[in-house]
Image (spheres, grey):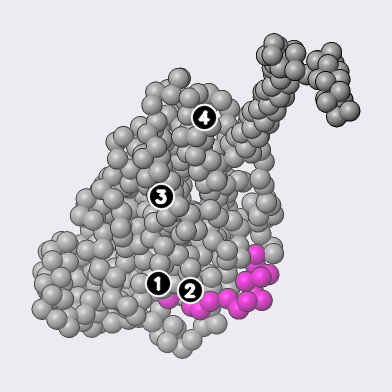
Amino acid sequence: MSKESAFFDYINDGYKTKGDFITLGAAMLGEETITDAFVKIPLKTINRHGLIAGATGTGKTKTLQVFAENLSEKGIPVLLMDVKGDLSGLAQPSPGHPKIDERHAKIGLPFEAKPFPVEILTISEQDGTRLRATVSEFGPVLLSRILDLTETQSGIVAILFKYCDDKKLPLLDLKDFKKVLQYATSEGKKELEAEYGRVSTSSTGAILRKVVEIEQQGGDLFFGERSFEIDDLVRVDENGRGVISVLRLTDVQDKPKLFSTFMLQLLAEIYNTLPEQGDSGQPELVLFIDEAHLIFKEASKALMNQIESIVKLIRSKGVGVYFVTQNPKDVPADVLSQLGLKIQHALRAFTANDRKAIKLTAENYPDSEYYDTAEVLTQLGIGEALVSSLSEKGIPTPLARTMLRAPMSRMDILTSNELSTLIGNSKIAKKYNEEIDRESAYEILNKKIEQANKVEAEEKKREEKEKVARKRSTSSRRSTRMNPILKVVTSATFIRGVLGVLKKVIR
């Protein structure tokens, strides 16, 4: 048997699957693509999470696009974090190209250009269906971890949430939470301390500064109503294809705190909302987080622990999370160890540190008699990657240098007119883009303070009147209790007598 035939059998046996699957491409031996040696990912294992990594310009985004398209075709909804703004083209068919036909001929797959059902989402001022969540939905624990609070400060946040629950004060947006913080150390201090214990002014001041930091990164747009419902992320269209929700994040690259806040809340909400799925044949939802280092950048230890916990637990809800980044080192080791599928594009060895990083990356992949992994990592072409996944039994598949298939949709962004039309045709945009600012903690406490000030002003006015009345009464009493000598001096008889004397003297 030739080496090529042996390799063909090695790949097909290693990627054999009884259930449904998606095909990423065909395996390569050296520089040659082995036609029909398909690299297949069982749908059953896609909720085991994954990584798409590689240097800039090696094809990570197109791999993400191919993955999302094939999931959608299988009726699986997808959520894409579009940090660079180049994934909207999923809504339009590929224009095709001779090189695409040549690539697919090598792989052994037919190429069909087609558009996919796309929903454009936003958490900022960009156009699209707006994603929001209320402060109450975060809860005191998650909010404290996002704000990186101390144990004492977290305790105060828990007290404030309890107070708002007891007094029926809805915490919807950041201005609600800020108002409660201010109220707790001013007009409402006695009330809170009487029922819940002492609330330190220095602690509430520190919490307020952390809230302002989130607010300055755009959190005031994210916190509020109407809250986005997870059911609207797991939709299928009239043709049974999963809806691909593209979250535009091009203006949050310099706002890591906001990005981390949003991602953690979204993962927590998905985990709390979706039912346990058990050993299902396919995932309920797949998330792709592009530029994943933004999640972990400046993340506190508590926040990191929360992310790691949710990533470990969320797969039981049938949700797969895929991190897309330049270097696997961007993802913490504890998270990296949870990822079943790894698609590694080329890495560049320009420096000694680069070579060390490549060596460490190679150690994350299974050994193979067909590849020197560290060497291949620097030789991969655009649209090629090393792939290692899990079989249906959870066993790592053979490492395969893979010629990846081309996207069926456009490998470019939508024009402004196309984007406007897509957003205008959205079935959920009207529902979530309506401005809602119902009465909440901010308005209720302002009314309470206003009423208290009014009562205080009336009381002060009453006291002032009483003071004036008392003063007049005192003056009157004083006038009737004059000095006896003064009474005599000012009496009419005395004046007449004196005047009489004066008159006599004058005469």
What residue is shown at x 54% (from left), y 73% (from top)? 89
Distance from disc 2 to disc 3, alpha carbons, whole Å, reads 35 Å
Depth check: 154 or 281 in front?
154
Calculate the distance from the C-alpha at mark 1 to the C-alpha at mark 4. 52 Å
Three-letter amino acid code of the residue under disc 1: Thr
Find out whether the residues at labels 1 and 4 contact each other: C-beta distance under 8 Å: no
Compute the Cα span from label 2 to label 4: 50 Å
Depth check: give the residue in front, 115 or 418. Answer: 418
Which three-letter amino acid code belongs to the residue tagged 3?
Answer: Arg
> Closer to the N terminus: mark 1 or mark 2?
1
Which quadrant of the figure has residue 385?
Answer: bottom left
Sooner in the amino-acid sequence: mark 1 or mark 3? 1
Q: Is residue 195 visible?
A: yes
Q: Is residue 412 magenta?
A: yes
Image quadrant in which the C terminus is located:
top right
Q: CA distance from mark 1 to mark 3?
A: 37 Å
C-alpha separation, residue under disc 1 versus residue under disc 2 = 8 Å
* Callout 2: SS: loop
Q: Which residue has dot 2 on it?
A: 86
* The residue stretch that appears in magenta: 406-423
State the residue position of label 3.
Answer: 209
Mark 1 touches mark 2? (CB < 8 Å): yes
| Location of residue 196 by image quarter | top left
Dot 1 falls on a residue whose secondary structure is helix
Q: Which residue is labeled 1 in the image?
A: 61
Question: Is residue 477 among the parts visible in the rendering?
Answer: no
Q: Which mark is first along the chain, 3 or 4?
A: 4
